[in-house]
Image (cartoon, rainbow, N blue to C red):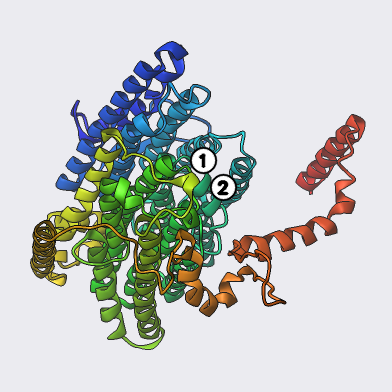
Amino acid sequence: MATEFLSPGLLIIAATLLAAVSGVPLLAMPRLRASSGQLLSIILMLASSFIGLSGSILVLLSGRSELYTLLWSPPFGEVRFGVDPLSAWFLLPIYLIPACSALYARSYWPADRHPENAGTMTFFFGVMVSGMSAVLLARDGISFLFAWEIMALSAYFLITTESRKAEVNQAGTLYMITTHIGTLGLFALFPLLKLLSGSWLLPASGSLDASTPLASAVFLAALFAFGMKAGIMPLHVWLPSAHANAPSHISAVMSGVILKVGIYGLIRTISFFENVPLWWGCSVLTLGVISGLLGVIFAIGQHDLKRLLAYHSIENIGIIFMGIGIALIGQATGSNTMMLLGMGGALLHVLNHATFKALLFLGAGSVIHATGTREIELMGGVARRLPYTALLFGVGAVAICGLPPLNGFVSELLVYLGFFHGVQGEGIAAASTALAAPALAMIGALAVACFVKVYGIVFLGVPRHEGHLAGHEAGWPMLLPMALLAAVCVAVGLAPAMLADLLQRASQAALPAKYAAELLPLAALVPMPMVSLAAAILLLLIALLAIIYRRRLFSAAVSETATWGCGYQRPLPSMQYSASSFAQMLTSLFSFALKPHIQRPVILEQSPPVTSFKSHVPEAVLELIYIPALEKLYSRFVPIRRLQNGILQQYVLYILLTLVVLLVADYF
């Protein structure tokens, strides 16, 4: 156990406790002093984030692990908490994104204007951050489950902040049902681990043999439970509605951070095993390809700005799964290079996705704050009134598309390099990686098409509806967090080498110890200086073009006129491309998966009356698969429901019969 008073582990534990109480000032202060209470809560959250980031960076720099055991021992055994480079890497977004969101809420959700829910929202926000941190620190199954439930319940209260809206309550209910279904998977996972290791304590890295049927059961339970929290398809059904209906700064934390807790749980569980079978890696890789492709395809068909971003979270979780799959295939085939590139790419994309997705959700919140709507079809011309938001949202859009010179390109490059090394192998491993590489390229191309639609429809053109004319630009408490996240996106894209050593240590901690010692340095496998040089040149060219354009614009006579009207004498805003028309070709191409609902106008005469065109892309997995299956299941079990009739005497009889059966079974 570390004995230093200011050891990195103690700093992280202190940050966890400080985050838990950060919302108390606003909750405790009277409404007349709500603004002061909110400011104090923000200061506490910023302090927690600073302390937590400091401790996490120190752990990554040193590469050391720390373990703490509580003197109190519950019936299930020892209670342990600890930190190592793997958990420290995941703690980086856990403390970075909530700090930005807390400051953002000062203007986006001011307490004096939302007295009915600002206090409870701020309180549960801090509790959720503390719960996520505690999950990463837990080193025994029981503590893990307690922290997991704290995180899950506090997220529910944040999703249902605006509980007076029916759609918000529906989203919260769906989230609560699915998150507890996932928790049932954890109730299976930890007893299975106890059977393998003989203890409720989490096993050491590489201490278990993956070749047994019980090990495969552990893997499948972890894939189900943590995959549902991460939002991997087809376990993603809670994610689009939850992220769309939560306040935007809460959506930024849920999409940027809470999904990654599921990724952490899966990686941590996999790290317990050595000699993993090939089908583990192929299964994770296949899920990643499916989630990445279908996630971006569903995003293209969305009209709701935040729901569109939510589907892109599913896409990027798929990319992370692809990296993990490559690492597992490398472990099964004995390729240290694939292990490091796959795991390094997955872990780097965890951090990258957290930053650019939080940036996009905060940018979307700024647009919604100004226009009063989430419907893309009602927006337009927002950039003229929100120029800084448009610029920062554009940075996030380029990053999420995996384009240079930003951070999304770097992490996807590592995954691509893992694919290229995998193709050089033989058999199923080579075939799997050969098919996954073009799938990742297709994901990137479709992401570009989707964000061209978003940026063009939302920020360019002219306003499409007078009732949603873009208001004023956001204040500095909203713009500063967005600028900080954009700066991280640019910095990682320009200088990925600054993270190479930290990423190396985190990747080594995620892999069995016997492999970690044999890994080559990441800098030897990835041409990071060339990436930095190419990114710098590209950024310089963009800056030069911008300067030349501004000089020509200032030297020319400027006049304002309508955009080209396609031959119409008096073009109207409704004649612009809409989100539906822009994406129509792609939604038609992938209609077999999207199952779009289209209401076309019926024209039966030469001078038809006013009509309209409507299209809607449903949540196909939920609405066309899960709900019909559950309805059939419900109808089959109606006779059994008669046992629950509200008669107390019958319930006592059930208990008595159960006890008799258990006693008889124990006797024999």
Q: Is residue 333 above or below residue 497?
A: below
Marks 2 and 1, the one that precedes in the sequence: 1
Q: Which residue is drawn at 12% across and 54% down?
A: 498
Instruction: Name the residue tied to disc 1.
Output: 152
Amino acid type of disc 1?
Ala
**Which quarter of the rendered picture does the N terminus lie within?**
top left
- What numbered label is drawn on residue 30? none
Q: Residue at x 84, y 57 (%)?
A: 635
Assign a secondary structure to mark 2.
Answer: helix
Instruction: Estimate the x, y position of residue 587 in percent, counting from the top left.
Output: 52, 73
Assign a secondary structure to mark 1.
Answer: helix
Q: Residue at x 45, y 19 (%)?
A: 27
Q: In this view, does 130 lie above or below 305?
A: above
How packed mark 2 is, by other alpha carbons closer than 10 Å (few <14, some 14-19, many 20 or more), is many
Instruction: Estimate the x, y position of residue 400 in percent, counting from the top left.
Output: 32, 61
Instruction: Estimate the x, y position of residue 243 in percent, counting from the top left.
Output: 49, 48
How packed mark 1 is, by other alpha carbons closer than 10 Å (few <14, some 14-19, many 20 or more), is many
Q: Is residue 572 above or below residue 252?
A: below
Residue 542 quadrant: bottom left
Q: Do the residues labelled 2 and 1 touch (CB within 8 Å)?
A: yes
Residue extending farthest to the bottom is: 426
Q: Which of 283 and 168 is in front in this view?
A: 168
Amino acid type of disc 2?
Thr
Instruction: Name the residue tied to disc 2.
Output: 179
Residue 558 quadrant: bottom left
